[in-house]
Image: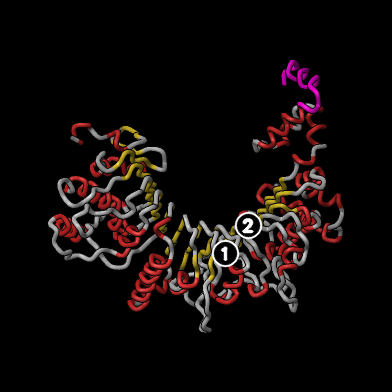
Amino acid sequence: MPSIFATSILYMPHEIQREFLYAAHEAGNDMRPLSQVCRLWRKLSVKTSRFWTDINIDVLRSMNWQTEITAHNTACNNLYSVETYRELLPWPSTVLERSGSQPITVNVRLLFGNTRMCAHCQAIYTTLVLRLLVTHAPRFKSFTIVADIWEPIRSFSAALFDKRMPVLERWDATLDGSPVPLGRLTQCNLPTIPDTAVFQHPWGIVHTVEIHSELYPKLDHLSLRGIIHRWERFLPQSLVTLELSNLPLNCRPTFEAFMMILLNSQNTLKELTLSASAPLRSNTPTSGKINLSKLEKLHIGYTFSETVVLLPEFLEVPALRSLKIHDMTYDNPRTRATQLGFAMNESNTALFHTQIFKRWPMQQLKHLKLETPHSPGKFNQANLIQLYRDIQAGRRRTQSIPLFTTLFLGCHSVECLNLVDPDLVTLMALATPVALQGGEPGVLPCYRLNCLHISTRDFEALSLFMWAIKFGAQSCHASRLKPRFIPSLLLDVPPAWGTRLREFASRQVCTSISNFGGYFEVGSDRVTNLLDSLPLEVES
């Protein structure tokens, strides 16, 4: 640093200098380089515990761990020594000391698959990290752990069993690389579900509100991806956000335990994610419904259509504003194995979408995302043209309206629609106008749509969709139909598609057509808005 600036810093009042550091810290800047600007700033920053509350431990950032841990095998007999932690985990140990008594945010990444550690070294590393952090558990404000093997997560969970974490607000645990359970008989390949784990009440103890309030009074965000529990002993209550993902079919909560988990947060839950984790319906009849009165965001992903087909029957979501549905059944070998399996899946999928249309307030949704949607039935280009002609002529339709068209018609308040890898039937359902009785113009599916985001690698389906809305705009004049108009069309496609898509683009149906990658390639040019490449005379 130039001497003139160093002199200016030295003569500033300490209170002003500390405010500079506070501002840098609040902006998300790392305090480590700032503490090295000058000795005065170092002294101020090191003695301010508020600056050192982010603890990050990543096995990939540890250099030569194979050599270091082998050389320090004796550390197994001296794991409580401060010198051991300072030698093997120098920076996390330093930050923990500087954090004083402040609540801390902990991020642990143990992706051993990208290292050359042997199993013995992995165990030593995990034990060192565990014992370094667990003593600070009462100060955990946010805890995130990502591992590619089960053992580190199980060890942390067992070590934190029945420990008070009075300031804990957020817990994220991810078993990275855990496969999405696809096969009907998918079994949990993890060790026995632990009896002692964080968020489980001890065996034989009656689950009460007081236990949760004593251990985790501020916990409001819980995310478990590929993590199993004894769900009937699950403690968390009054959650605001809950995510359960990638649970093997035989390790999911029973229907009764699942209902109890939701009931414990019935009046507080605002965001719920159930991705490959919904239980099979119990044979035991259950009465009543769960009314999640404050739930605004719901994400449902399913590999077995029978696990969600009756979900709308017992789940009431009167405040729903955002819905995401991820259909993973077509990645399931069982779906493609037999015609019966395929037919049952289509039947369940149709029933599920019919149920959500009837029972959930789809008319008030603002955001809708459909990932890999597969609309039951078939609907080709000839059917679309015939449907247009029937409606224009006022004749009775000879082609049935697809299920997704009915769904989109019910979502008339949706402003942002996101389609990921949609099939042709789903896209055509969005492009199809429908005439109403009484001589009024046809109402378009999602007619208040401001932004449509399509991510696909199926050029044929996308081009047919763009052709359909362009064809509709050209043929709807002086007819009973309203043309499809989308203010903003955002595509996530290869830039090289620009030249081929340009012939399907029209200013009559869009204000802008942009690509998620930033540009389209049209000939030798790059354009950010595909419509800018159209000659004006074409759109007369």
**x and y percent of residue 9 in the render?**
77, 22
Residue that sits furthest to the top in the current view: 4
Q: Is residue 120 visible in the rendered structure shown here?
A: no
Q: Is residue 152 visible in the rendered structure shown here?
A: yes
The residue indicated by pointer 2 is 221
The image quadrant of residue 161 is bottom right
Residue that sits furthest to the bottom in the current view: 284
Q: In front: 175, or 236?
A: 236
**x and y percent of residue 223 in the render?**
61, 60
Could you tell me what secondary structure mostly forms the magenta stretch?
Answer: helix
Please report the bounds of the magenta region as a residue range: 1-16
Q: CA distance from mark 2 to mark 1?
A: 12 Å
- Please indicate whether residue 423 sits to the left or right of residue 191 in the image: left
Q: What SS does tag 1 mark?
A: strand
Quadrant (top left/top right/bottom left/bottom right) for the C terminus? top left
- Tell me the amino acid under the disc marked 2: His
- Please indicate whether residue 160 sits to the left or right of residue 300 in the image: right
Mark 2 Cα within 10 Å, few/some/many (few <14, many 20+)?
many
Check residue 8 for magenta coloring. yes
Number of labels in the image equals 2
Figure check: 240 above or below 524:
below
Please tell me the numbered disc located at residue 225. Answer: none
What colouring method underlies this structural image?
secondary structure
Quadrant (top left/top right/bottom left/bottom right) for the N terminus? top right
Residue at point 16%, 65% (across, down): 398
Residue at point 22%, 52% (across, down): 441
Q: What SS does tag 2 mark?
A: strand
Q: In front: 232, or 195?
A: 232
The residue indicated by pointer 1 is 244
Mark 1 Cα within 10 Å, few/some/many (few <14, many 20+)?
many
